[in-house]
Image (cartoon, rainbow, N blue to C red):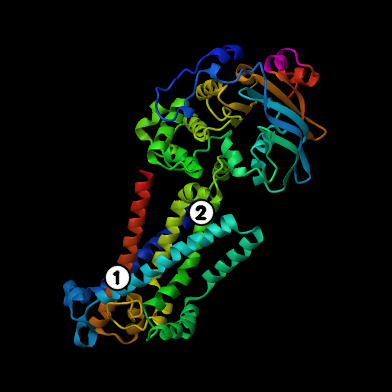
Amino acid sequence: MHGGSEQLRRPASEKTPGKGDGAYTLGPMQAGPVCCDPQPLIQVDNLSLRYGAKTALDNVTLDIYRGCITALIGPSGCGKTSFLSSINRLTDLIPGCRTTGRIRVDGCDIHESACDVQALRQRIGMVFQKPTPFPVSISRNIELPLHERGIKRRADTAAIIEQVLRDVGLWDEVRDRLHASALSLSGGQQQRLCIARALALNPQILLMDEPCSALDPIASGIVEDLIGQLRGRYTIVIVTHNLAQARRIANYAAFFWVGGHAGRLVEFGHCRQIFESPAHELTAAYVNGVRG
Amino acid sequence: MLWLLCGAAGIAAALVLLILLFLSAESWPALRHISIGRFLNDPSWNPGESMYKLTPMLSGTLYAAGGALLLAIPLGIASALFIAYYASPRGAGIYRHLIELLAGIPSVVYGFWGLTTLVPLINQLHPPGASLLAGILVLTLMILPTIALTAHASLLSVPPDYLRGAAALGISRWGMIRGVALPAAKTGIAAGIILAAGRAIGETMAVLMVTGNVVQHAASLFDPIRTLAANIALEMPYAMGDHRAALFVSGLTLMLLVMMLWSVAAQLGRNRDG
């Protein structure tokens, strides 16, 4: 494994020879905006979230920077996943879930009526803890969101499918069986397919909810390296319980804690600062394994 | 306990075999006296003059069941999708109860309703009214609940992860249904369709009451037909000798038809797994 700063300068390990739409190629990491000049892409102001009478998140204010990897860390039940799914309004699907506060993505308020939730979710890819490939063929998994977007020409979809599968390093493993069921893949391959599926829409943002925790250590390592390579091209917000992983891949870290029966944001800062010189004693206790 | 279960299972299996054996034994005189070719090639079905053509009734059975499936499959699946994904929880509950009620109506009541309401209506459109069309419509109503309820049950068993994953990709509800939910539920839906087809082929009373029971190949939807099952019910009370045995051949044919359906279904299931 490698340290975060080295990762920043390292070019993508697999550059794809000029096939398909260039927009879908992973460029070298330098191509992305530089993390040390942070521009906020997601601005969360005073976000509170309730499930019925239970408050899951209390008054969170946080900026997430373009092109960087931001890790959300903290104990279970402190609202990290709720925070993540309110960014693409997936919380709308949960009956009884109410959010207050403002979330702006690229300056645009996602709760305003002008914001089309379907278009929002096409701009924000999401990867879940448990790999969720649809029970259809590998290629069909990627075609579905493309068709929804209106990309229907066979040549176009084939090019994008190859591109995103190359981007996640799955192409050589599945090129001969694109029409086989996606459920025939191993857990790690399924998770990479889910990442490829999210990348197919060329999103700005990737939300990842513990993407490695359901995988074995080797598959987990592969997916982690992949996430590192996506830095710069995408703005990534990742929930992880694996502090070592957060330390390896993240530029920024946000520490959540349960205080007064609701999740709160305790501290946000550069990943190194959070882990090496935390300002808050709870953070220090958590990252040193004393509490949590 | 094990013995009890084995015994019960054994009795059930033995009953099926006994029925098959009984049908074959009772059909045997007809199969021996009247060659199989005559069931296909005789000029007509007229047991009084030793004519035993079964094909018009076979076609009647297949037309009625096929037509009903053609209508009930899309209606049933659409109902299931409505309950599962579009209706409000309250509306879905009410609608589902209505369909369950439909499933519980005895077939003779369907026949009665068909005879007094549907047949006169069709008669106004095109006499005589008692027709293949009436049979298809009554059968559609009877098998619709089977298809709708099994399809709904298999849609409910689609993991919510799929739906959440589809929503996170910005896929619309209809896109999710077509691309994810239906493919995930297709085995259960297919099983419901096979069950419904079996019922449509074997249904006797309601069909007998509305189809006119004329032994002929239907040339149009408005022609009366007779199905194999109706044939048995109509003639068994007075049939004797070869005639009686020929009716058992009708029954045997019906049973073979249903068995063929099941084996096709089993084959499809195997291909899917393989």
Give the spatial CA distance, label 1 vs label 2. Answer: 33 Å
| Residue B28 percent across, percent down from the top left | 23, 73
Main SS, magenta residues = helix
Q: Residues within 10 Å of mark 1 (few under 14, many from 20)?
A: many
- Depth order, front residue of B185/B260: B185
The reply, left or right, for residue B249 in relation to residue B98 is left
Q: Which residue is at 23% across, 88% downward?
A: B48
Q: What residue appears at the point 51 percent right and 48 percent down from the top-left corner? A: B175
Magenta run includes residue A71:
no
Is residue A288 visible to us here?
no
Which span of residues is magenta-colored? A271-278
Residue closer to the observer: A208 or A289: A208
In which quadrant of the rendered image does the C terminus of chain B lie?
A: top left
Tell which tag, 1 or 2, sits nearer the viewer: 2
Judge whether B97 appears above or below B109 on screen: above
Which residue is nearer to you in this view: A87 or B110? A87
Which residue is identified by label 2? B154
Mark 1 or mark 2, earlier in chain:
2
Determine whether, in the image, residue A278 is placed left or right of residue A224.
right
Task: Measuring from the top left, give residue B223's x and y in whole percent.
Answer: 33, 81
Left or right of residue A92, residue B240 in this image: left
- Observer able to see residue B228: yes
Q: Amino acid at mark 1?
A: Leu
Q: In which chain is the residue bearing label 2?
A: B
Provide the secondary structure element on which disc 1 rests.
helix
> Is B208 positioned to the left or the right of A30 in the image?
left
Which residue carries the number 1 mark? B252
